[in-house]
Amino acid sequence: KWSCVKDNHTGLVWEVKTDDGSKDNNTTNNTHTNIHHKDNRYRWGGKTALGRIHTKKEGTYHNDWTGLVDGTNTANFCGGNNWRVPTLGELRSIADLSTISPAIDSHYFPNTTANDFWSSSPYTGNSSGAWRLDFDDGYDYTYNRNYNYYVRLVRSEQ
């Protein structure tokens, strides 16, 4: 098994989720013993969310996935310390619309839940919304930032 996958087309390096058999889905206070576990979910808006540091930020920004970003960078995970939540466009680049449930190449991305993954992109049409990609069908949708969805990190090569 591997911890990361490099997309040779985009040059991006992606986190691969783990499934060590333990359920680590603490959505109450978002403290996870295995930060890369496939079952961890977060509300939208942690560190690296677009617009978060803007002086006129709009809407709610939760800190839920900040521990995932910080822990991954501190560990120099897969040789990098510039991990972040991907933009909607980046997340779309790994969706595979030729398959469903999950709509992703599970040879490269094992343990991917056929469900919603947050992007770092807020929805500009409504300050309470943000963009997510549903890996059940591979399409993107907006939803309320207060919902708990999955997060997969990405980084550019250093």
Image (tube, helix red, strand yellow):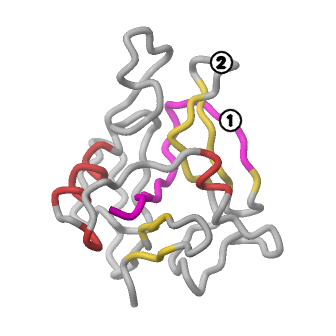
* Sequence-first tag of 2 and 1: 2
Residue at 47 percent of width and 36 percent of height: 44
Q: Quadrant of residue 100?
A: bottom right
- What segment is highlighted magenta in the picture? 140-158
Near-viewer residue (104 or 23): 104
Which label was assigned to residue 126? Answer: 2
Residue 55 is situated, as x and y percent measured from the top left of the image, at 37, 11
- Identify the amino acid type marked 2: Asn
Q: Are marks 2 and 1 in contact (CB under 8 Å)?
A: yes
Residue 7 is situated, as x and y percent measured from the top left of the image, at 55, 72
Could you tell whether 132 is left or right of 138 in the image? left
- In the image, residue 72 sits, relative to residue 128, either above or below, namely below
Near-viewer residue (46 or 32): 46
Residue reaching furthest front? 158
Q: Quadrant of residue 8?
A: bottom right
Pointer 1 residue? 142
